[in-house]
Image: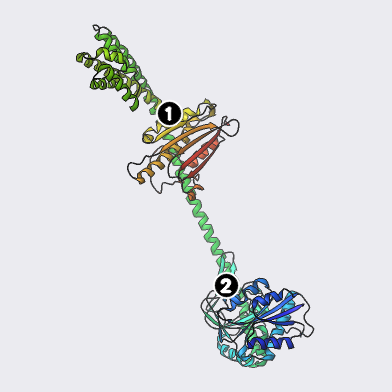
Amino acid sequence: MKLLGIVAGRSAPANRAAALLSERLAGCIVRQVDDIPAALELAEQAEHLVFVAALVPDGEKSADEIFRPVVAAYPDARLFLLTEEEVLSGVAELTDQNKIDLITDVRRFADRQFLLNVTDQVRRFCAIANIDAPTSQPDRESFIFAQALTDQEIMDRIVAGFDECLGYQPRILIPPGVRLTIEGSRVEEATLALTGQVALERESHAGNVLMHHASTGKIIGLLALTDQRAAFFTSRTTTEVLGIHLTFEQVNYVVQARPETALLIAVLFIRSLDRRLRRSEDIQIEKVELAAQLETEQANLARALTNLEAARAELLAQARFASLGELAAGVAHELNNPMAAIARTSSHLLEDVSTLIAGAPEPWSSHARQALTAAHAATSLSTKEARSLKRAMTEATGDPVLAQRLVLAGIRDTDFAREVAGDESVIAELESAASIGTGLRNLASAATRITELVASLRSYARPDGDPVMDVDVHETIDESLRLLSHRLHDIEIIRDYDNLPHLSCRPGQLSQVWTNLMTNAAEAMTDAAQRSGEGEPIGTLTVTTRPGDDPGWIRVIVSDTGPGIPEHLMERIFEPRFTTKSGQVRFGMGIGLGVCQSIVSGHGGRIRLASSERGTDATVDLPTEVAT
């Protein structure tokens, strides 16, 4: 079978249509089947499926549902809707896709007209498919309405003429939002909009532009039929539209049968109106595009101004930080000398007190010197060690209260404790000597601690300059931990250091990176603990150092047990001035991760973050030699 037409359904109207087409349609084989699935099976045997006709509605199915598999399998086939309904709904999808080719009211079946309409559709299919039409097909007639539109004043007469000449034409009910024509697409039918409104749109660089709404004519598609069959507009229903779907052959037939429609006057009027409208619409599109371009330029200027203001604010902040660095360096320098004097004074006091005690009578002198020296040299004891020492002292003295006093005084020698046990005056004097030793020890320890903090502060406040050779990265990490001790006192700190080579780097800048990563981790864990309620442990901060994956590289990992960073923020975490603090203003020693990335990149390294609900890992890879 070369050309095949199918009538789906076994009702009386379908039987009549199939019989008429089989008898009178030359050059095309017509077959009648039970339903659309059977029609698709039969179509597989044909070289060309020309048309499929079906009675709608078929039970609960709409025309859209009936013809959907045909459209999917054979998009070029012509679709004929046979209906017994005066108003046919359920055709929104077919109408929107311009797939309805012929609608026939089978209650008022006109054999000759129906056959002519189908013949026209067969000829049209052959022209589109570029195949030879059956020999009995007449030459294609020209469209009698060249660029013609009718106005509302003669709409009633036009509708009456179509019903009179063609028989009653089924009305279709089209919901809002359905396209009757598509800009640039082929148009082969017209729609008479009896009620409702239709908008005409054009595409532009600024998007779809509404060209006409209230001024839209009542006959949709006539102009496009003479414009190389391509629609100039996309016509879209904006309200529910009651319409009549007509082929241009049907329109031709009525016009030829009713010349009183004043065809020539309408043609001249429409041609003039069309030229004016097309010009005005081109101007309107140009206006919209220029307005959109102006808005874009204004938005670009606004963004540029915002960026300039942000850059100015950042420069001012950098200037303030530079001034703060100078001030911190100066204060650190001024603190260094007094701390050195305090440390020397502490050492001299120990020597002077020891000399003073040595001049006292024995055995008091020996006991006091031993208590002073023991207390000064004593180290901090863990709770477990203190309990163990107290038990040993109790065994030596036989008095748990005395044992506790001796432990607090810094006495660690059980033999000495056994020797002085029982003499309350000696014990009181030993406690005084031990108190002096403890005080001198605390003074020296505090001076040393302040000296270390001053050294760390000076390094932190002077981050720039030429790279420093032979830098121990562990020292830069420890300096940051000392500076942040006030923020980390409730957090467990774990140092997992490997044996690493020394670096050539800017140690002050690296200290800034470690300080920021640790500050962020501490804040995340502290905030999570506060939300969880009292009694919850704050968390653990782990600093791990390892050799890098590549030779000549090292790796530093700062890990926390906080709640992690939300996934939607991870891609923005290194943006300049980006913060996850939700508008909070905090004063601390941290800097943004964007600056951290800049510092690490300036050392030729890499930084990346991995986060989950169990915590966040910040990994920094650094080469041992940084470019100068």
22 relative to 339 in the view: left or right: right
Q: Image height check: is 581 above or below 11?
A: above
601 relative to 225 in the view: left or right: left
**Rendered image coloring scheme:** rainbow
Residue 320 lies in quadrant? top left
Q: Amino acid at mark 1?
A: Ser
Residue 262: give x, y in percent of width and height: 63, 90
Under tag 1, what secondary structure? helix
Question: Which quarter shows the C terminus?
Answer: top right
Residue 456, which numbered label? 1
Q: Nearer the viewer, residue 58 or 124?
A: 58
Residue 201, which numbered label? 2
Q: Amino acid at mark 2?
A: Glu
* Residue 195 visible in the displayed image: yes
Q: Residue furthest left?
A: 425
178 relative to 320 in the view: left or right: right
Residue 624, which numbered label? none
Residue 347: give x, y in percent of width and height: 34, 16
Residue 283 lies in quadrant? bottom right
Residue 268 lies in quadrant? bottom right
The residue at 37%/21% (across/down) is 337
Q: CA distance from mark 1 to mark 2?
A: 70 Å
Between discs 1 and 2, the one toward the N terminus: 2
